[in-house]
Image (cartoon, helix red, strand yellow):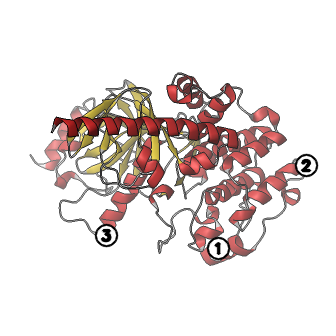
Amino acid sequence: MPMQEEQQIQASQPEIPRKINEIDEQRVVGDELGLPDAGGPFPVWFARYELRSLIGKGALGNVYRAWDPELGQEVAVKVIRGKVPLEPLTPDDEQRADTFQNELHAARLMRHPHILRALDSGVAARYPYIVTELVTPARTLRDLIKAGPVHDCAWLARIIYMCARGLAHVHRHGVVHRDIKPENILYDADDNVRIGDFGIACMLREGRESGEEDIPGSPCYISPEQWLQQELSHKSDLFSLGAIFYELLTGQKPFHGNDLKAMIRAILREQPMALSELQPGLPAGLQQVLDKCLAKQPGQRYNSCKELADALCLLFPEIADDKLDPVVEELDKSIRTLDFFADFTDAEVRTLAENVLYEEYQPAEDIIREGHINNSFYILTRGSVEVNKGQVVIDKLGVGKCFGEMGYLANIERTASILALEPDTAVIRINSLLVEQLPANVQLKFTKAFIRVLVARLQQTTSALTAYLDSD
């Protein structure tokens, strides 16, 4: 059918959403994605989602407000620019795929009130996409900066406090965001924060380093060690958050330059102008907080984003939330029901709930993959899993069961795979780094409980081996 005739048919039936999946190559014109721009036409079907409007455009692709008929709610759909090629991948294709997988993997592991939650992902019409919760109205801290300096210090401190708590959760998962900037921090009608866009996140636990030739991120918020291409830690994100805090308070960026080289030189060598010179009357303690966030050397900054959040609470006691995070609250309740934690006091359970990693998996998703190195120990808190060896099911585990003991102890290749069986199967994941950060009394209780599990596992293995030998 000629293109002009097809366009006439569409114009006469605007109420029927077009299906991007069915568009042929000749009709993909204008925007590289072949999807509608801000001017429409909308709605458009993409995969199972009805795209209703364009929310924004970024380096990786477009973000759309959409309707998910399966969930019965509006969502945000991020469609990655550039189709999945049919031919062998070029280096650019592989880098784009890696970036997308980083964002998906990081976002799906995170479940926290201040992290944008990932709901789905896939490829439609050869376009990769990721679906997240929809934040309405879609405001970012960039919108706040454009309005000028924020004079309500307590309100602004609460915004940064929520960012710090969200980043603390990210860092406990061994992830450095690497692109903390105003555009990637959203806040809703109730002024609750969500951190999104994990496209260039660095997965520390996978041993990834920051030696790329092209430095990712936004120039004026990049830490000195990132510009110097040194090994990154969570303190790089802390620097970026401090730069945003400074800009929100003063209306000016902490580091200036007429070009990129001058900007980098300022970040590496110069000190920001004192708050008292730009906004007289601000609480004196804010200068100390910013000085510590924006220190040139990572070792001179706060040890963690949690420390930053605690420092803000000392200055503004009213900013802290009155109740636990929903995730912590759920963990606090579930941990108390598990035999592994039977000897823990209420205070010790609370400490664990605030510090362990909590992850959810969908049916057939790998929690542990055979042949991969994984140094974590897991406790199943919801749902069930199956144990596979060479694609043969050898066991099934339910709530309260533990797995991963040997990998936790020896950091060796896994000898079996663990797959989730039920929707929203949930586990607590613990590694040695997290245990080292726990108070000494909690470490001791955990070690004793872990040894009991390990002894029981060895006894079970011995019994199975004895039965096998006797059968001969």
Tell me the tag on residue 91: 3
Tell me the tag on residue 264: 1
Residue 172 percent across, percent down from the top left:
57, 47
Residue 171 percent across, percent down from the top left:
57, 50
* 418 sits to left or right of 375: left
Tell me the tag on residue 243: none
Residue 227 percent across, percent down from the top left:
59, 71
Q: CA distance from mark 2 to mark 3?
A: 53 Å
Name the foreground residue: 106 vs 36: 106
Q: Earlier in the sequence, mark 2 or mark 3?
A: 3
Give the residue drawn at x 27%, y 29%: 15
- Residue type at mark 1: give it: Ile
Q: Earlier in the sequence, mark 3 or mark 1?
A: 3
Q: Say if mark 2 contacts mark 3, CB within 8 Å.
A: no
Q: Secondary structure at mark 1?
A: helix
Q: CA distance from mark 1 to mark 2?
A: 30 Å
